[in-house]
Image (spheres, grey):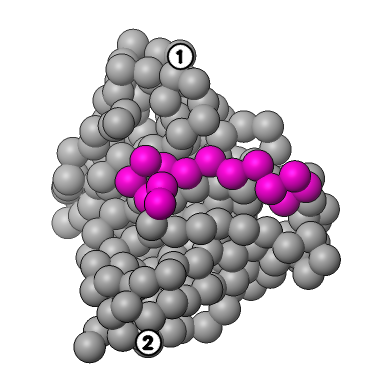
Amino acid sequence: EVQLVQSGAEVKKPGESLKISCEAFGYSFTNSWIGWVRQMPGKGLEWMGIIYPDDSDTRYSPSFQGHVTISADKSTNTASVQWNSLKASDTATYFCARRGGSLNFFDSWGRGTLVTVSS
Amino acid sequence: SYEVTQPPSVSVSPGQTARINCSGDALPKKYTYWYQQKPGQAPLLVIYKDTERPSGIPERFFGSSSGTTVTLTISGVQAEDEADYYCQSTDTTGSYWVFGGGTKLTVL
């Protein structure tokens, strides 16, 4: 059974850095793209980007390029997204999700990580 | 950047048919996928490749496509279908994915 286990909720101050993670179980981590989706409070889903863990090929949404860094560690079957300097507007739930084979959709999702940025 | 557009809300009575449209210039060339999201939960895929239904999704969920518009139809809507529904596709290159803004389905 495919499982994506995300790290726990975070409370940070503006300007702080943060890395949240998503550990994959039940499939070959290196051979499936894994992506990140943001959901701001009460708002819709936003595609942030996607990474292929085998070679770390990464695609970013233009809206997130330069603001976050998506990475993957093959040794721990873990994907991550990192911020160097958080803003209040980064407050959101962040989902990781696995791409469904060769098609451009997500077939398995993590439960989400709530990130709260507040002074 | 590329966008796909959905109505913000749709309301139907139990047993009626709900239709949610999603529009985008690249939709004739790229597949569309539909997700259901209930409060506090991760999204769940209900339609893939425009018209296909994953195993475990009730037959009342139906996807169709015509030109630049794709439609999620839910026949015989039940109270448990009340949720937010998102269409998702890609730009013409396939490299950049996009979600619609979401449609809140209310079962009256």
Give me the C-alpha separation between circle 1 and circle 2.
42 Å
Count of numbered circles on the image: 2
Q: Is most of the magenta stretch helix, strand or loop? A: loop
Q: Quadrant of the C terminus of chain A?
A: bottom left
The image quarter containing residue A61 is top left
Residue B11, position as x, y percentages in the image: 17, 48
Which residue has dot 1 on it? Answer: B29
The image quarter containing residue A14 is bottom left
Identify which residue, B107 or A82, lies in the foreground: A82
Q: In the rendered image of this protein, does residue B94 appear above or below residue A117?
A: above
Residue B108, position as x, y percentages in the image: 17, 56
Query: In the picture provided, is A114 more to the left or to the right than A36?
Result: left
Q: In the rendered image of this protein, does residue B42 appear above or below residue A60?
A: below
Is A65 covered by the magenta stretch? yes
Chain letter for the residue marked with disc 1 in the picture? B
Which amino acid type corresponds to the residue marked 1 in the rendered image? Lys
Q: Which residues are magenta?
A: A53-66
Is residue B35 something that shows in the picture? Answer: no
Which amino acid type corresponds to the residue marked 2 in the rendered image? Val
Please tell me how crowded label 1 is: few (under 14), some (14-19), or many (20+) other residues with Cα within 10 Å. Answer: some
Q: Residue at x 37, y 87 (%)?
A: A11
Which residue has dot 2 on it? Answer: A11
The image quarter containing residue A90 is bottom left
Query: In the picture provided, is A113 more to the left or to the right than B77?
Result: right
Q: Secondary structure at mark 1?
A: loop
Same chain for the residues under marks 1 and 2 in the image: no
Q: Secondary structure at mark 2?
A: strand
Please tell me how crowded label 2 is: few (under 14), some (14-19), or many (20+) other residues with Cα within 10 Å. Answer: few
Q: In the rendered image of this protein, does residue A8 appear above or below residue B88?
A: below
Residue A70, position as x, y percentages in the image: 55, 57
Is B83 covered by the magenta stretch? no
Is residue A90 something that shows in the picture? Answer: yes
